[in-house]
Amino acid sequence: MAGYLEDKVAVVIGHGNDAHRGVAVALAQAGADIAISGVAQDLSAEAALHSISNEIWALNRRSTVVTMPADDAPSFALAVSATTRELGRADLVVRCDSVANA
């Protein structure tokens, strides 16, 4: 799958958890540059987003972090707009949600 998304830009929206990280890294391994986007409610949450971004850079792909103020549709539009400013465009948007064990 390496190179399948070469020169594409993906916005990966999530909570900085394992699901978010896994999707972002898989897309980067396929050749995409990645905008890591999520709600940064505190410094720990923001650090998690930056940690994922650093992993993307380590794969020799461009990455940026786009924090959103709330988990709603206008924020998603802001994430895509910020990605376009930072990385030139947004070809793909993926929202990563995970289900916690009850």
Image (cartoon, grey):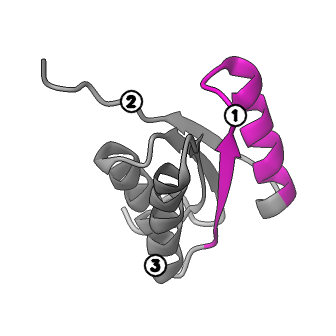
The answer to whether residue 10 is above or below residue 92 is below
Name which quarter of the figure residue 24 lies in.
bottom left
In the drawing, does residue 1 fall left or right of residue 80? Answer: left
Q: Which of marks 1 and 2 is in front?
A: 1
The location of residue 63, given as percent across then percent down, is 62, 67
Q: Does the magenta stretch include residue 69?
A: yes
Q: What residue is at 35 percent from the left and 47 percent from the top?
A: 17
Numbered tag placed on residue 69 in the rendering: 1
Label 2 is placed on what type of residue?
Asp
Relative to 100, is 61 on the left or the right? right
Q: How many angstroms separate mark 1 from mark 2 (CA)?
A: 17 Å
- Determine the image quadrant of residue 29: bottom left
In the rendered view, tell whether residue 47 sits above or below residue 67: below
Gap in angstroms between the C-alphas marked 3 and 1: 28 Å
Q: Along the line of sight, which residue is nearer the eye, 80 or 45? A: 45
Extreme residue in the left direction? 102
Helix, strand or loop under label 3: loop
User: Outermost residue toward the right?
Assistant: 85
Is residue 67 a member of the stretch shown in magenta?
yes
State the residue position of label 2: 97
Q: Which amino acid does label 1 sit on?
A: Pro
Which percent across, then down, holds residue 96? 43, 35
Which image quadrant: the N terminus? Answer: bottom left
Q: What stretch is highlighted in magenta?
A: 62-85
Does the CB distance between marks 2 and 3 fall below 8 Å? Answer: no
Residue 3 appears in view: no
Residue displayed at 56% across by 40% down: 41
Q: Would residue 5 be seen by someone viewing this image from the given angle?
A: yes
